[in-house]
Image: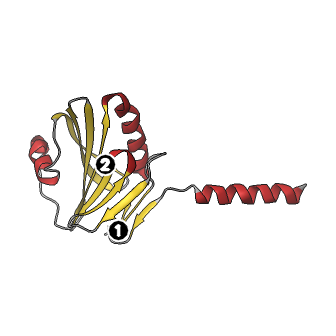
Amino acid sequence: MRTMTLAWAAIAALGLIGCSNEFESAEMKVRYHPPRGVKFVDEVPGPPRVAHFSSGLEIRSVDTPPPAYQEDKLEDLLKVVSPEASGAIISARPGSLDAGKVVRWTLKEEGRRTIVYFVPRTTRYLVISMSASEGRYSDAENQLELSLSSLRVKD
């Protein structure tokens, strides 16, 4: 009986290991567990180097020093770190994650919302973005927020 229980525990553990969707990139110096159901698609060397995931999630690693910013001019910062971001800014605020200080924006455009995170490091910065339809956005946003606690960045 005990041998059978140990066998089933080993099979379950192997199943969990096989189901991990952890993303790790030596080039981007990033380790991250994307939200449940979101899969890594590809990594483009750039510059900037970009990791694409399913469900509209991407991580960009920009190898230039992060731009300085003022908290009352976050719209200007968004134009610099994510010039392709479009839509009306409905929120912009500084904050922090386990990975360090961040600035977070939420944008709205034609039935879609986009969340953008700027993660400054010493000699570079990351931009994490995700877009989703209005109907799916709330759940996608919550899942992204939870997953960002797993973000590890090496400098």
> Cβ–Cβ below 8 Å for labels 1 and 2?
no
Q: Is residue 131 above or below residue 21?
A: above
Residue 146: percent from the left, percent from the top? 43, 43
Residue 102: percent from the left, percent from the top? 26, 50
Disc 1 residue type? Lys
Q: Is residue 91 above or below residue 60?
A: above
Label 2 environment density (alpha carbons within 10 Å; few <14, some 14–19, many ≥20): few
Image quadrant where one finds the N terminus: bottom right
Disc 2 residue type? Ser
According to the image, label 2 marks what residue?
96
Q: Is residue 109 above or below residue 24?
A: above
Per the rendering, the mark at residue 49 is none
Residue 51: percent from the left, percent from the top? 33, 59
Tell me which numbered mark, 1 or 2, is placed earlier along the sequence. Answer: 1
Q: Is residue 14 above or below residue 71?
A: below
Q: Secondary structure at mark 1?
A: loop
Number of numbered tags placed on the structure image: 2
Which residue: 87% across, 60% down?
Answer: 3
Which residue: 44% across, 52% down?
Answer: 39
Depth check, front residue: 109 or 80: 109
Colouring of the image: secondary structure
- 71 to the left or right of 13: left
- 22 to the left or right of 112: right
Depth check, front residue: 38 or 76: 38
- Residue extending furthest right? 1
Q: Secondary structure at mark 2?
A: strand
Quarter-of-image position of residue 12: bottom right
According to the image, label 1 marks what residue?
29
- 26 to the left or right of 110: right
Quarter-of-image position of residue 145: top left
